[in-house]
Amino acid sequence: MRNMWTIASREYKHYFGTPAAYLVAFMLLVILGIIFYANVVGAMLQQFAPGVQIVLGPLVTLLLFATPAITMRLLADEQRLGTMELLLTAPVKDWELVVGKWLGGFLFMLTIIAITLLYPIYLHQIVDPGIDQGLMVSGYLGVILLTAVLTAIGVAVSSLFSNQIAVFFATLGVYLILWLVGLPSQAMGAMGGPLLKYLDLSEQFYSTFFQGIIDLSSVVYFVSLTALALFLGTISVDSRRWR
Amino acid sequence: MIQVDGLTKDYGPRRAIDNLSFHAEKGEILGFLGPNGAGKTTTMRILTGYMPPSSGKAMVAGYDVVDQSLEVRRRVGYLPETVPLYPDMTVYDYLKFMADLRHLPSAEERVDEALEMVHMEDRADGYIANLSKGMRQRVGLAQALLHSPEVLILDEPTIGLDPAQILDVRNLIRGLAGERTVLLSTHILSEAQQLCNRVLIINKGRIVAEDSPAQLQARLSGAQRVSVTVGGDGDGLVNLVASISGVAGVLSAKGNSLEIETVPGLDVRASVARAIVEAGYDLLELRNIGMSLEDIFIELTRESPAAPEMAESEDLESFEE
């Protein structure tokens, strides 16, 4: 456990010394701000009060691209630098390494997400009678759970390559599959349709947390998917020893 | 301290090390000598718990490297071939990170001590990215020494260092040996000769010779070589020397100096000196040149059918006759 924290804190601190991490955070916040501004102006013209969804919707989409940019270096860079040999010959368990890396990346993503709270808070000030705070809580809980999954997948994919660009695109590919896997569920009908719908990452977010519903089965889905990704990442690191 | 039995590692169809067996006692410096690709790094990686062997058994500091990997890793200091450093960390932060991973009780003190051992105190706050290769090597060494490990495994510890630094690192290793067991690999033969109590020559994953540097030399140089230099141009010197009894042959002759090989077991220096002086030459130099470890190394790692037999001959005397 202690090693996990040692590794996580090194990773977390590392991001604050990396221009790339600042750039990713900056881009996310700026794009989110532009969309936010456009939505607020649009809503004012059409004279309706915008909800917190105008932040949550774009935020989730942006996270799909920002998260792999943050997680891609986590294990791939250790390969490239040869420091994997250092970590794997230190008295550190493989899972402590993988979970520590995940935690470091996850905490940094949470830091970025915390800053985005400024938008709903501002929105709360300008609309009357304020935004639906229940929706904001459920929405942000969903975003946090989703980020946990995205980061865990990012770490697992990062263990496979030593090239960060390869990790970035491979991670995006995995996201895309999970994001769209529910699409054929209608066509498939009762045969596996509900299953695909359950497996779908976007469905799990948009039909529950995004609507202000905290659904236990969705929480279980996100938590177990995170655990599964970290488990696979650990196996991948361990298998490196046998290659 | 280190006990290896029948260690074998396959990378796919390629056998990197083949049925390796050796041991190292406490306080010993064991040198691993061999050409590139001989299996030195693979063996070290197995001993440090980085990868498991395909078959065979290895015990380090009393623990099995496969079943008790974490125990082994706690007790081993390892400097891999490519020094594993984070360029964007300062020297101090890097060592502190490693000390924390090893749960050292007074981490800061240990970091300072390790820095002192490798003479890097003044660069503690510098970024690793800005260090020279020699300094990086020393930071890597400091990392391996942090927890005062019982066993130190160093993969080519002096590679890339300048002569002064090499001397420094060698002295450091020599100083450490008393209380620890050191296994180091090198392909610098003089280094093995100077540093190690025992040398393992390894080629194509097999041990082809194992002995102290001095014994190895003795065992392979039954015949002595003598170098002779005379004043003047040395005309007719070759014929004169070749006719002396006990001289097996003249190996090379360059102007006024030549190298001769003796019949095994005979010291011909006295008779050579007398013959040369009596023939009217001025004898400037006469010295024994043992076969260097270099020659032995090349001899053993050359593709020769004789090599595997040597590994089996444990008994030195039986080989020398």
Image (cartoon, grey):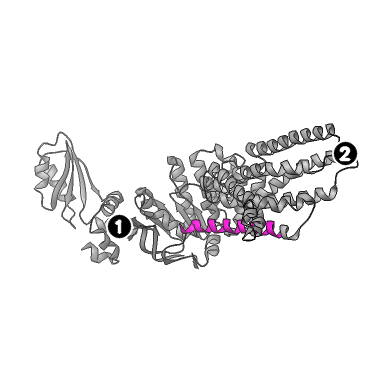
For the record, the magenta segment spans A220-243
The residue labelled by disc 2 is A125
Question: Quick one: SS at disc 1?
Answer: helix
- The residue at the far right in this view is A129
Tag shown at residue B216: 1
Q: Residue at x 66, y 36 (%)?
A: A23
Image side of residue B264 versus residue A117, left or right:
left
Q: Are marks 2 and 1 in contact (CB under 8 Å)?
A: no
Residue count near mark 2 (Cα–Cα under 10 Å), binned few <14, some 14–19, many ≥20: few
* Image quadrant where one finds the C terminus of chain B: bottom left
Q: Amino acid at mark 2?
A: Gln
Picture coordinates of residue B182, whole percent (x, y): 46, 57
Q: Main secondary structure of the magenta part?
A: helix
User: Is any atom of residue A9 visible in this view?
Assistant: no
Which of pointers 2 and 1 indicates the residue nearer the eye? 2
Picture coordinates of residue B138, whole percent (x, y): 51, 45
